[in-house]
Amino acid sequence: MNTKVIHGSTIIPGLRYRDAHAAIDWLCKAFGFEKHAVYENEHGRVMHAQLVYGGGMVMLGDISPGGFGDHMVQPDEIQGRETQCACIYASDCKAHYERAKAAGAEIIEEYAEKDYGGAGYACRDPQGHLWWIGSYDPWQAE
C-alpha cells in the first residue's frame, strides 16, 4: 500500500527548450507560473526545472543530445506540429488570455466560451510549444 501524501497532480508534463532560462521567465510572466526549483549544470544550462501553477506543475530543461533527449524534437523541427500539449486550468480564463496575449503568446485559437462549459484558448509559447488554457475544471465535472 502506498502511503505517500500527494500534494499536487500525479501527472506532470515535461518539456524541453533550446533556451530553458528564457522559457522559464516567459512562462512565469505570461502564464503566472512560479519557480519551484531550477537546477543548472556547471555551464549554467538548466538540467531540470519545476514550475508550479496552483496545484499543478510542469518540469522542463534545456534540450540535450543522448539518452531520453533523443526521443524528443522541438516544434520547429516538425513544422510546428505536436503530439500532445500541456493544459492549464485557469478560473479566470479571460484574464489569463489577456495576460498571455500581452506577453506575446502566439494565439492559435482565440478565447471563446465553450458549449461543454467554461471557456478556453490555445497558444504557442515563444519556442513553439502548444498550450491549451481553459476554465473548465475536469475535477469538478460530473
Image (cartoon, rainbow, N blue to C red):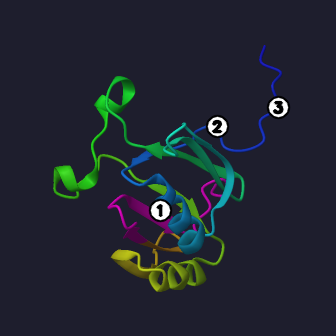
What residue occupies the far top of the structure in this picture? 1
Instruction: Tell me the quarter of the picture where residue 132 sits.
Output: bottom left
Q: Quadrant of the N terminus?
A: top right
- Mark with earlier residue (3, 1): 3
Q: Main secondary structure of the magenta part?
A: loop
Q: Dot 3 lies on which element? A: loop
* Residue type at numbered disc 1: Ala
Q: Judge whether residue 125 is colored magenta.
A: yes
The residue identified by callout 2 is: 10
Q: Is residue 65 above or below residue 20?
A: above
In-front residue for pair 99/89:
99
Q: Is residue 118 visible?
A: no
What are the residue bounds of the magenta stretch? 122-142
Residue drawn 55% across the image and 65% down it: 25
- Which corner quadrant holds the C terminus? bottom right
Which secondary structure, mark 2? Answer: loop
Question: In the rendered image, which residue does mark 1 sit on?
Answer: 22
Tell me if 5 is positioned left or right of 28 in this view.
Answer: right
